[in-house]
């Protein structure tokens, strides 16, 4: 197979100034020791303004021949940063945002984000926010997503680790019991018009993710990150993961992603190269590869 598929990245993090300020606040920093100090400690580039970061991301996508990318506001309450970026580059960036369903203003935030700001991905982290997928507060948020065309619900399942929090010594009191993909099936069946996206092949819960996706035809999986969770199943390889996923749900519900996030590292081409090699070696047809690496994204989030 000649590999020349269009590349769209379904999973990038938009580490805005507000993201670093939030981390600084969680460490109890004073106003003079805020976001830029955190960047310096991490040896990451200061993002500057949301406009500057958006421009840098698009320049990076250009350099890597990536057509479009989903960018995630990676702390609750940072929808405006991503909205600025999408407004600046609407043909290149699709806006996702994290929401804490336990927050008193969660419903208002989600409604504003998808109706007024034009964001297209509502991101739920059940283990992080200690709100299960069967909770009525989650259902109310999904109802809003269902009311807006081309709006997806991203649900992090399985193992959850946030590298930047570990580097800064911030606690991560996650309840992993809340991240089972099978718990997503009720929501997916209740809202069949809503595309649900489970990142990292279920992040260690591949079997349950495949069962849920097989039963619910609106559940999609993304391929993002190094997928180091495969070490939890001795002998499992990423090639076997791709083959099993395509065998069960086909290529039309698999979205390529890298989990790229900060600069100067930028877009993680190594993730792409590894996955391209796997897909090519697995005998996936050119048409199916085109769906995985770009076509499915364009279908879910049309311009």
Image (cartoon, helix red, strand yellow):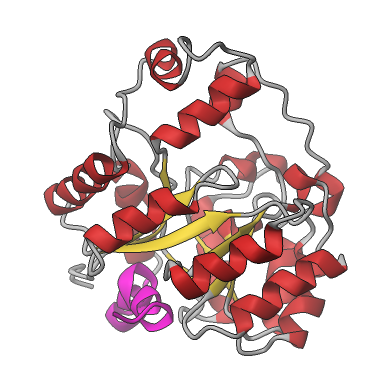
- Say which quarter of the image contains residue 165: top right
- From the image, give the main secondary structure of the stretch colored magenta: helix
Quadrant occupied by the N terminus: bottom left
Q: Quadrant of residue 303?
A: bottom left
Image position, residue 18 (x, y; %): 46, 35
Q: Is residue 100 above or below residue 6?
A: above
- In the picture provided, is 60 more to the left or to the right than 247? left
In the image, the segment drawn in magenta is 283-303
Residue at the image point whose x is 49% and y is 27% from the top: 21
Using the image, determine if residue 161 lies above or below residue 269. above
Q: Is residue 247 visible in the rendered structure shown here?
A: yes
Give residue 149's position: percent from left, percent from top.
49, 86
Q: Position of residue 139 (x, y in %)?
A: 78, 73
In reply to whether residue 177 is colored magenta, the answer given is no
Q: Decide: is 140 above or below 21.
A: below
**What residue sits 31% from the left and 25% below the top?**
46
Q: Nearer the viewer, residue 51 or 168?
A: 51
> Foreground residue, 48 or 281?
48
* Magenta segment includes 300: yes
Measured as percent of width and height from the top left, residue 116 is found at: 46, 71
Q: Is residue 233 above or below residue 104?
A: above
Q: Nearer the viewer, residue 154 or 20?
A: 20
**Residue 12 can be seen, yes or no:** no
């Amino acid at each position: 197979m000649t590999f020349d598929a269009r590349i769209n990245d379904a999973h990038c993090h938009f580490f805005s100034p507000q993201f670093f300020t939030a981390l600084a606040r969680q460490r109890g920093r004073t106003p003079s020791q805020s976001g830029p100090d955190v960047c310096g400690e991490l040896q990451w580039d200061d993002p500057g303004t949301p406009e500057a970061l958006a421009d840098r991301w698009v320049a990076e996508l250009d350099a890597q021949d990536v057509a479009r990318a989903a960018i995630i506001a990676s702390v609750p309450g940072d929808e405006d940063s991503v909205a600025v970026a999408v407004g600046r580059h609407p043909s290149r960036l699709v806006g996702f945002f994290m929401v804490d369903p336990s927050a008193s203003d969660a419903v208002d935030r989600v409604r504003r984000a998808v109706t007024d700001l034009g964001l297209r991905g509502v991101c739920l982290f059940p283990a992080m926010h200690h709100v299960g997928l069967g909770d009525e507060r989650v259902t109310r948020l999904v109802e809003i997503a269902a009311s807006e065309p081309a709006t997806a619900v991203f649900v992090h399942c399985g193992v959850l680790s946030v590298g930047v929090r570990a580097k800064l010594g911030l606690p991560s009191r996650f309840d992993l019991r809340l991240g089972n993909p099978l718990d997503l099936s009720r929501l997916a069946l209740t809202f069949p018009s809503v595309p649900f996206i489970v990142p990292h092949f279920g992040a260690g819960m591949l079997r349950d993710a495949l069962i849920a996706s097989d039963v619910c035809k609106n559940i999609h999986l993304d391929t993002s990150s190094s997928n180091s969770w495969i070490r939890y199943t001795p002998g499992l390889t990423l090639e076997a993961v791709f083959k099993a996923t395509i065998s069960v749900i086909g290529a039309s519900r698999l979205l390529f992603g890298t989990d790229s996030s900060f600069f100067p590292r930028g877009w993680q081409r190594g993730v792409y190269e590894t996955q391209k090699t796997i897909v090519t070696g697995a005998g996936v047809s050119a048409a199916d590869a085109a769906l995985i690496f770009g076509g499915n994204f364009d279908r879910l989030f049309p311009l």
